[in-house]
Amino acid sequence: MKKIRIILIAMLLIPCLSFAATKMVTAKKAITNLPSALTKLTLKSDAEITFPHKVPMTSKKKYYASAQTTKSGYVIYVDSTPECHGVHNCNIGSITSEKVGNPQIYYDMQNKEITIPVTLVSGHRGYYTPGHAMGDYWPPRLEWRRDNILYTISWQLDNKTAQDTLMYMANTTLPR
């Protein structure tokens, strides 16, 4: 019985330990121009602008934000260089908002569903997809709907910590 109890405790702690390996930093501290990018986006969009309170910091570099409106929402890119603007080879992550759309279910090359449902703290149903190769590499992502808006967070993360990290980010995403 004692052995089973120890195994259960270890199983409960493993996600916490893997999440702890990802250093989370206040977004405004990690992303050099985040406030100005969000302000510009607020002036151009009638959508509610949201961004996670903390983001994963995978290096000692500063990150840079750029944002743009889309037909049905916006996208905020977080990049390794100020000139990147979401280009695949220098993009760290992104946050998107769409007034239309539903979470997408992804499949691997063997046609096995890799997207799994998760429950966010707010009780909203989320859909987590691990990073995967499909003609190109697609970083881990988490999608959920709130107030008829589809939100997506995608970030370059190790798949061992990605689900916990993205769920934390989604749970700290607050309206601006």
Image (cartoon, rainbow, N blue to C red):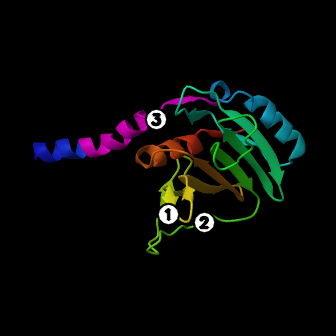
Q: Secondary structure at mark 2?
A: loop
Q: Earlier in the sequence, mark 1 or mark 2?
A: 2
Disc assigned to residue 115 = 1
Work out how far the residue at label 3 is from the one at label 2, CA to CA, in angstroms. Answer: 26 Å
Over which residues does the magenta segment extend? 10-27
Q: Marks 1 and 2: CB-CB under 8 Å?
A: yes
Q: Position of residue 155 (x, y in %)?
A: 58, 46
Kindly report the distance in space between the C-alpha atoms of the residues bearing marks 3 and 1: 22 Å
Disc assigned to residue 22:
3
Along the polypeptide, which appears first: circle 3 or circle 1? 3
| Residue 90 visible in the shown view | yes
Q: What residue sits 84% from the left and 59% below the top? A: 71
Q: Main secondary structure of the magenta part?
A: helix
Name the kind of residue labelled 1 in the image. Thr
| Nearer-the-camera pick, 136 or 115 | 136
Type of the residue with mark 3: Thr
Residue 89 is covered by the magenta coloring: no
Q: Which residue is mark 2?
A: 104
Res. 176 visible in picture: no
Q: Quadrant of the C terminus?
A: top right
List the single residue furthest toward the right: 43
Residue 158: image quadrant is top left
Residue mark closest to the camera, 3 vs 2: 3
Q: Residue at x 47, y 75 (%)?
A: 111
Label placed on residue 155 = none
At which x and y percent is residue 141? 56, 53
